[in-house]
Image: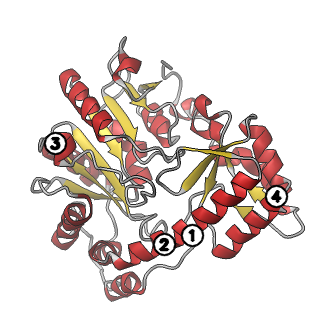
Amino acid sequence: MIPATGTWASRLPEFPWDTLIAAKETALAHPDGLVDLSVGTPVDRVAPAIRRALADAADWPGYPATYGTPGLRKAFCAWLDRTHGVSDLAEGAVLPTVGSKELVASLPFQLGLGAGDIVGFPELAYPTYEVGALLAGCSVQRGSTPAHFAEATPKLLWINSPSNPSGAVTSPEQLRHLVTWARSKGVILASDECYIDMGWDVSPISILHREISGGDHTNLLAVHSLSKRSNLAGYRVGFVSGDPSLVKSLLGIRKHMGAIVPGPIQAAAVAALDDDGHVLAQRSRYADRRAVLMEALGEAGFTIDHSEAGLYLWCTRGESSADTVDWLAERGILVAPGTFYGPAGDRHVRVALTATDAKVAAAADRLTR
């Protein structure tokens, strides 16, 4: 367990991607240019219906509601029911967020946690779970099973399925076990489900699904995003939903913070949630890129672990992640070292599927040449 000490700035780790500067310079020097597979940023176009909705709502001179428009809340609940089988979300138990990262980075603070409180998150984890805990002055502990917290119980435990970085999916049995344990200990269980629409070999399930929650969302929060499913990373819109009392408390804090999704963005989000077609089309693009990269990485001697869902391939050559990053950079390919996500990632790298078809083909050619 790592205690939080000093000022907030001194407690924060170095921003991970700032450490890739040397590898990026090497990759940029490749005669055929850089193929950047290090960041999961969408590159494909926003669907026309979403862009039209944004434009049609552009004349919005007043302040939007922190709570979101009734149409937005209705569209989110309908999507969660239609696509992921969550049919019993309570009235008012959903809030729009300014992207999902904003919520992740500030959730411990917004829940009133601080010095003396523990925030837990998986051994392989999105770095912002730790950052959010440290910003609130909390202590942090890696682990995602009750066994990891035998000596000290966290106030907040993050889980992430499908996982960023590994693409692993937590089974329904494991989720039910976690929910039962969290309830027995009074732990708030926050489930990051931002990649839930990107299941390849298995179908991820929401922690709010009746099969997992038993229809009781007490102390459960789920975080969703439109960034990856709808190519809306630039729009900055996500959602937190679940326990009505926790959502109500978050609403009160967020009103004071001015954490409001802009009105035109809310209108665009409704269009994105109402249309499943563009999501299926985007999934197809990613599936094709995934197949190309999996074959090429295999031919180049990589082993791909997990990766049954999400937008990344979790790969190893049986060496340190730093050595693999350098090996790929010499071929003009930039990836994220597994150490970005914790010490357990030292032998892996994360390869993103979020590049154009041409860039993915170029990467495959360099890997197999």
Of labels 2 and 4, the one closer to you = 2
The circle drawn on residue 288 is 1
Going from N to C along the chain, the mark reached first, 2 or 3, is 3
Residue 235, percent across and down? 43, 69
Q: Is residue 314 above or below residue 188?
A: below
Mark linked to residue 109: none
- Disc 4: which residue: 27
Q: Amino acid at mark 2?
A: Ser
Along the horizontal axis of the image, is 357 left or right of 140? Answer: right
1 or 3: tag closer to the N-terminus = 3
Return the residue at label 2: 284
Circle nearer the N terminus (1, 4):
4
Q: Which residue is mark 3?
A: 217
Cα separation, mark 4 vs mark 3, equals 47 Å
SS category of the residue bearing label 2:
helix
Q: Is residue 135 above or below residue 162?
A: above
1 sits left or right of 301 in the view: left
Front one among 206 and 139: 206
**Front tag of 1 and 4:** 1
* Of the pair 257 and 185, the residue shown nearer to us: 185
Task: Give the amino acid at mark 4.
Answer: Ala
Do callouts 2 and 4 mark residues in contact (Cβ within 8 Å)? no
Query: What x and y, as percent, mark residue 38?
Result: 65, 55
**Type of amino acid under label 3:** His
Measure the alpha-carbon separation of dots 1 and 2: 6 Å
